[in-house]
Image (spheres, grey):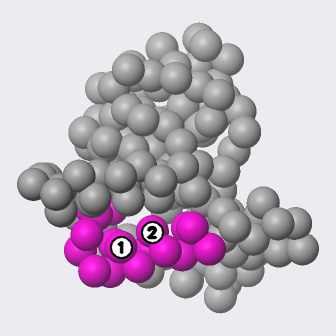
């Protein structure tokens, strides 16, 4: 079984820095941290992009910015802007997805990611046949199911 190729958007990377007093946010944080552990264990393949670099650079908190940026080192692929990405993004924007979000999805599609992981409700409602869009908790449900079916073979 090939390793799942994943793309976490900046909302996902920022989730541990959100107010953890809400159960949903706390659970998404724990799931996101578990996904990062899967990356470190080389159980899934992380993809990075110029959009993650850009959005991360907007943070006023240098420690948070530095911590997030370190994940670029673990990426199997780092996506730069291209005509293909801009074309994919323009089509996605026509469905009502905002510019930056559409560029993130386009980067993930361009990198042949299997999963686009976000905690942004608007993005989670978007569907695209080229990629599975889910939150960190749903990704772990899917991943555990794949791992179990692989173990049974």
Q: Determine the image quadrant of residue 121.
A: top right
In the rendered structure, the answer to whether residue 15 lies left or right of residue 31 reads right
- Residue 79 pos. (x, y %): 31, 50
Looking at the picture, tell me which residue is in the foreground, 111 or 59. Answer: 111
Name the quarter where the C terminus is drawn. Answer: bottom left
- Residue 120 pos. (x, y %): 69, 44
Q: Label 2: how many residues lie within 10 Å, few (<14), some (14-19) or many (20+)?
A: many
Residue in view at x 65 percent, y 88 percent: 63
- Residue 52 pos. (x, y %): 50, 57
Q: Determine the image quadrant of residue 152.
A: bottom left
In the rendered structure, the answer to whether residue 119 lies left or right of residue 83 reads right
Q: Answer whether residue 131 is magenta in the image.
A: no
Q: From the image, tell me which residue sits under label 1.
A: 38
**Relative to residue 113, is residue 125 depicted above or below?**
above
- SS class of the residue under badge 2? helix
- Magenta residues, dominant SS class: helix
- Residue 97 pos. (x, y %): 64, 25
């Amino acid at each position: 079984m090939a390793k799942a190729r994943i793309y976490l958007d900046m909302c996902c990377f920022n989730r541990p820095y959100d107010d953890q007093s809400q159960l949903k946010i706390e659970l998404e944080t724990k799931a996101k941290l578990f996904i990062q552990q899967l990356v470190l264990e080389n159980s899934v393949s992380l993809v990075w992009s110029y959009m993650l670099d850009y959005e991360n650079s907007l943070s006023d908190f240098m420690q948070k910015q530095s911590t997030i940026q370190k994940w670029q080192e673990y990426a199997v692929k780092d996506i730069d802007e291209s005509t293909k990405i801009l074309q994919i993004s323009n089509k996605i924007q026509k469905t009502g997805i905002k510019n930056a979000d559409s560029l993130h999805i386009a980067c993930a599609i361009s990198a042949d990611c299997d999963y686009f992981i976000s905690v942004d409700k608007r993005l989670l409602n978007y569907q695209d046949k080229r990629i599975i869009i889910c939150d960190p908790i749903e990704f772990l449900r899917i991943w555990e199911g794949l791992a179990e079916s692989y173990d049974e073979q």
